[in-house]
Image (tube, rainbow, N blue to C red):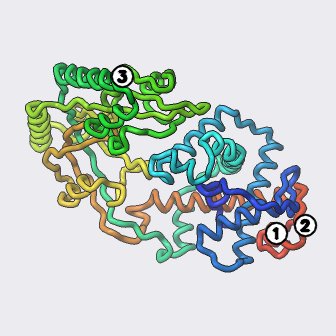
């Protein structure tokens, strides 16, 4: 059994559509039941996702297997008295909704609401049980596999068994470090930013239509990406924004404009449009203090001097990063971590264009000149890049890609452990399945109803 992530097509962006009215019980696992409508709804999503045109018996069995798997895990969660609190569910729901808004609706909560014809609160209500079930399943999986490790000899055995030609193809990868310098912003610049925001706030409050004036000013002057939409952030949940921003935003009244709020991104004023339960619809205007040209030149010259000290072999790269870098994560020794893989290896797709273009021109152990770097908050800095390694595209091997192969082997070992757990569990669990599905491979393989 190839174990897919639990959030495949059963809990996904489209899973809130209405189910059919069919309600025949087609399977029961302990106290957990599967309705015909559950299968039909999940199969419809599967068919849509994988563009299945005709009714596919094998695909239907595939979906049925994952429903059975889920119910077996939920049954075990009940047996083990696993507790998932409502606070945990709420936090996971907020993350899920924010993901849907950003990825599925381009950051506009209204598009999400229009797609489903429901408010954010109603969508959350529909998703709550599914998210809770997902958390129970993940906890049972964790308990089954928590003590599973893998040795180097097992990794080699895995490679020998699947064959070198079955190992994944690895794109060109880079390992690099940086030394970051953020130019100082003068107090006079900060004061100017605050004065501008106070002026905007007064204009808005004096206007007969404050919301329209707020939108116009945001479009003209805001430094945030939301400026094109008049500063609108749509509906947001707690936990999605900077804590200091939320502390003010969630205490505003409808139509109220905040005083200045400082965050890592800069200085804001906030407009609350409306509140729906624990969701608030917001707009904001962000102004980011900019360092002067002199301070920027000073930062570049500072990095040039650090580079020269390193090239003169008076200090090593990591020591220089710890001593001179403004990066809050410099305790890694200056090495940059890929947020997608949690490793130091980057492929071109996980790099921004400017960084990729710079690294691609370097040879290993070479330093770049200082280049502009703008972080996720939009703060301007400069940085030296040091290319530690550059590995050409290749098929994975145990020398250069041991960690990747090890993780694949470990995943397989965990899947095998869960498969073994299932086979043992069905022997002692009351499982009833409609005879129509007795020919599905999972029923035969797991020896259900024997």
Q: CA distance from mark 3 to mark 2?
A: 71 Å
Q: Pointers 1 and 2 in contact (CB under 8 A)?
A: yes
Q: Quadrant of residue 136?
A: top right
In the rendered view, tell whether residue 337 sits above or below residue 56: above
Residue 446 position in % (x across, y down):
80, 66
The one nearer the camera, 53 or 291, is 53
- Under circle 2, the secondary element is loop
Assess disc 2: are there few (<14), some (14-19) or many (≥20) residues with their C-alpha within 10 Å of its C-alpha.
some
Residue shown at the point (44%, 60%) measured from the top left: 402
Disc sitting over residue 205 in the figure:
3
- Under circle 3, the secondary element is helix
Residue shown at the point (48%, 71%) measured from the top left: 167
Question: Disc 2 designates what residue?
Answer: 449
Residue 229 position in % (x across, y down):
37, 44
Residue shown at the point (19%, 19%) measured from the top left: 187
The reply to whether residue 257 is in sight is yes
Disc sitting over residue 443 in the figure:
1
Residue 127 position in % (x across, y down):
67, 46
Q: Earlier in the sequence, mark 3 or mark 2?
A: 3
Q: Quadrant of residue 190?
A: top left
Residue shown at the point (44%, 23%) measured from the top left: 256
Query: Which corner quadrant holds the N terminus?
Result: bottom right
The reply to whether residue 309 is in sight is no
Q: Pointers 3 and 2 in contact (CB under 8 A)?
A: no
Q: CA distance from mark 1 to mark 3?
A: 67 Å
């Amino acid at each position: 059994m190839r174990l897919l992530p639990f959030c495949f097509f059963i809990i996904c962006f489209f899973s809130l559509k209405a189910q059919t009215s069919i309600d025949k019980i087609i399977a029961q696992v302990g106290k957990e039941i599967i309705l015909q409508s559950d299968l039909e709804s999940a199969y419809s999503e599967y068919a849509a996702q994988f563009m299945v045109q005709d009714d596919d018996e094998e695909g239907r069995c595939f979906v049925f297997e994952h429903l059975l798997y889920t119910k077996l895990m939920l049954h075990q969660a009940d047996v083990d008295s696993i507790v998932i609190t409502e606070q945990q569910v709420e936090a996971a729901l907020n993350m899920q909704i924010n993901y849907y808004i950003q990825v599925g609706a381009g950051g506009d909560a209204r598009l999400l609401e229009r797609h489903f014809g429901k408010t954010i609160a109603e969508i959350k209500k529909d998703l709550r049980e599914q998210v809770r079930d997902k958390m129970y399943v993940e906890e049972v999986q964790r308990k089954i596999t928590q003590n599973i490790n893998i040795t180097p000899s097992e990794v080699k055995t895995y490679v020998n068994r699947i064959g070198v030609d079955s190992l994944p193809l690895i794109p060109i990868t880079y390992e690099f470090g940086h030394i970051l310098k953020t130019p100082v912003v003068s107090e006079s610049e900060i004061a100017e930013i605050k004065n501008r925001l106070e002026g905007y706030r007064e204009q808005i409050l004096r206007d007969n239509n404050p919301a329209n004036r707020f939108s116009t000013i945001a479009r003209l002057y805001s430094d945030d990406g939301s400026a094109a939409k008049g500063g609108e952030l749509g509906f947001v949940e707690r936990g999605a924004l900077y804590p200091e921003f939320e502390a003010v935003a969630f205490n505003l009244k409808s139509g109220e404009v905040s005083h200045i709020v400082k965050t890592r991104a800069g200085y804001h004023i906030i407009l609350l449009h409306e509140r729906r339960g624990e969701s608030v619809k917001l707009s904001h205007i962000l102004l980011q203090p900019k360092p002067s040209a002199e301070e920027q030149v000073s930062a570049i010259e500072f990095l040039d001097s650090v580079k020269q000290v390193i090239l003169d072999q008076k200090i090593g790269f990591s020591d220089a990063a710890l001593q001179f870098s403004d990066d809050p994560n410099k305790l890694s020794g200056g090495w940059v971590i890929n947020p997608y893989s949690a490793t130091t290896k980057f492929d071109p797709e996980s790099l921004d264009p400017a960084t990729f273009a710079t690294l691609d021109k370097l040879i290993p152990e070479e330093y770049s000149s200082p280049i502009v770097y703008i972080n996720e908050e939009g703060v301007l800095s400069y940085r030296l890049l040091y290319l530690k390694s550059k590995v050409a595209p290749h098929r994975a091997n145990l020398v250069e890609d041991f960690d990747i192969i090890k993780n694949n082997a470990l995943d397989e070992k965990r899947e095998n452990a869960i498969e073994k757990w299932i086979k043992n569990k069905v022997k002692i669990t009351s499982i009833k399945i409609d005879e129509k599905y007795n020919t599905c491979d999972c029923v035969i393989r797991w020896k259900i109803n024997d």
